[in-house]
Image (cartoon, rainbow, N blue to C red):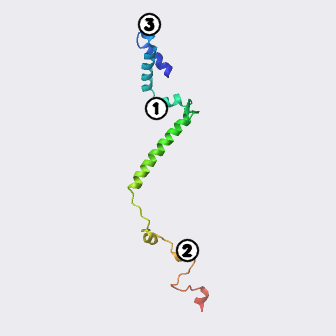
Amino acid sequence: MIEKRIKQMLYEKEWTFANLMNTSSIVEEFSERIFSDLSAKEKLDLVWEMNVVKDERRIKFAEYFYLLVSEKIKLETADMLKTEILNANVNFGNINKNKEEETNEISKRSLVGKSHKRGKTISKKDSEE
């Protein structure tokens, strides 16, 4: 992609020998144009496998990128969490206890195995007598 774009830019105009002698300005101009033409993924693909120096040791850019992105996410998460906590109302009591008991469909007696005291069960034997 880059090679094709460089050739295209070279052939766009007629160059004089004097123009071509100033290669650093040509490289700078072409680089800026290519940089603006590339998508973020294409830029990332260019450097993904490169080695970088972090804390005096060489690591892959992919690892460095992961560290940078992770650190940025952690910082933003911590800032947002701090803001939310500072603006939050905290309730250490159990205000909803009665509501929970009212909406609970299973009675406490059925959970502990106690029988209901409303009436006596009539068996077939008792009803015949």
Real-space Cα distance between discs 2 and 3? Answer: 95 Å
Viewport quadrant of the C terminus: bottom right
**Which amino acid type is shown beneath numbered disc 2?**
Leu
Secondary element type, mark 2: helix
On the image, numbered disc 3 is attached to which residue?
17
| Residue 86 in view | yes
Q: Which is more foreground, mark 1 or mark 3?
A: 3
Question: In the image, what residue occupies the spot 53% across and 39% down?
Answer: 67
On the image, numbered disc 2 is attached to which residue?
111
Secondary element type, mark 1: helix
**Which amino acid type is shown beneath numbered disc 1?**
Ala
Which of these two is toward me, 128 or 13?
Answer: 13
Q: Which is more foreground, mark 2 or mark 1?
A: 1
Which of these two is toward me, 118 or 64?
Answer: 64
Badge 2: few (under 14), some or many (20 or more) residues near its Cα, within 10 Å?
few
Real-space Cα distance between discs 2 and 1? Answer: 60 Å
On the image, numbered disc 1 is attached to which residue?
40
Badge 1: few (under 14), some or many (20 or more) residues near its Cα, within 10 Å?
few
| Residue 16 in view | no
Q: Which is more foreground, mark 2 or mark 3?
A: 3
